[in-house]
Amino acid sequence: MGFAFFVPRAAAGHGSYIKKGKGKNMIIVLKANRSKEQVKNFISDLTDRYDVSVNTWVGTHSTVLGLIGDTAAVDSEYIAAQDIVESVKRVQEPYKKANRKFHPEDTVIKLPTGQVIGDGSLALIAGPCSVESEAQICCVAERVKAAGATFLRGGAFKPRTSPYAFQGLKAEGLELLKKAKERTGLPIVTEIMSIGHLDLFEDVDVIQVGARNMQNFELLKELGHVHKPILLKRGLANTIEELLMSAEYIMAGGNEQVILCERGIRTFEKYTRNTLDLSAVPLIHEKTHLPVIVDPSHATGKANLVEPMMIAAVAAGADGLEVEVHYDPRHAWSDGAQCLTPDAFAQAMAKCRQVAWAIGRDM
Ligand code: PEP
Ligand code: MN
């Protein structure tokens, strides 16, 4: 397959960032009044199972163990379930390659087409929810490009809640995206739903993993062997740590070009499709060196809320935006209610530029 290669600036020599034996990575408090023999047996079970060493503090009422070493593989739920254990606390995150502690510099992803994500500039991914026809995708591509978009999005394989809803034009949709790319030069961002389709994605520039597949671990493992950036969207009901663990799956396979996407999570609120967790942006920047973008379209489900959330995402430091745009939202084949028209997108972009300028960001 003709996948393009490049190595993110901060990726070189990754392995050497992971040092074993530094700090106490997990603390286990044992229940009171356990015999020395029980404690000894538990410690040998730990050192047999995992590649760790154990420090022991014997107090008046309880014994505390400190696990040192590479505790990423340690199953804290297994430990917590042991009869001898009172509580377990991880003092180091379970992700390594995605962890900013081991890789302080931002990962900057450079596409062979010239676009850069994660260097402080704003990546602007825009286009319809679904590819519908050649005329539609080419027209939207031209309009979003004119408004400043740097990538074209468009779903060819669509994850729909109902099996009776439009499922996407599939392979034909990918061909139409290619035509729009030839016309505009905009690189393509589109979703993969099955690894069996990977051969069809040869000309796709950024492969999206949708919210529903964030924990499709077999898919993530296979994408770990692909030499293209992966846009990984946060699951509807997933924590930030789970998102980072999913990124870790891709990175553990060797593909360190992962872009995270906050797209709203499901809460009890019904006025919006999802709840945009905007504090995820600075938090993700703190926890990981990977770039993070925001999708205000799926986050809100309402076109009138998209512009304010685009602006807020820029102010929060997002590395990019993914926005659904259609010239005729009322007749869009999917997600019309949250689509901006090209004019509304252009207007929102102008406001984003002002905010970016006001806070000293490049756009
Ligand atoms: C999409 O971007 O087309 C999409 C389906 O989004 P999500 O996976 O975030 O629901
Ligand atoms: Mn959509």
Image: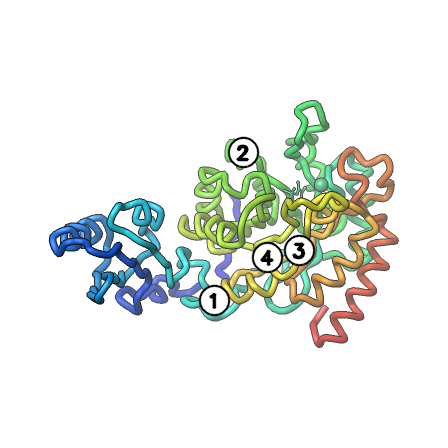
Separation (CA) of disc 4 from disc 3: 19 Å
Q: CA distance from mark 3 to mark 2?
A: 24 Å
What residue did someone put label 3 on? 294
Q: CA distance from mark 3 to mark 1?
A: 22 Å
* x and y percentages locating residue 216 in the rendered image: 49, 38
Left or right: residue 28 compared with residue 346 = left
- Compare residues 285 and 264 and report the one nearer the observer: 264
**Depth check, front residue: 279 or 179:** 279
Q: Secondary structure at mark 2?
A: loop
Of circles 2 and 4, the one toward us is 2
**Circle 1 residue:** 10
Residue 194: which disc?
A: 2
Q: Position of residue 96 (x, y in %)?
A: 40, 59
Q: CA distance from mark 2 to mark 4?
A: 23 Å
Among the two numbered marks 1 and 4 on one chain, the one whose residue lies closer to the N terminus: 1
Which mark sits nearer the N-terminus, 3 or 2? Answer: 2
**Residue ranking furthest to the left:** 37
Label 4 residue SS: loop
User: Crowdedness of circle 2 by 10 Å Cα count: few (<14), some, many (20+)?
Assistant: few
Q: Earlier in the sequence, mark 3 or mark 1?
A: 1
* Colouring method of the image: rainbow
Instruction: Look at label 2 and name its amino acid.
Output: Ser
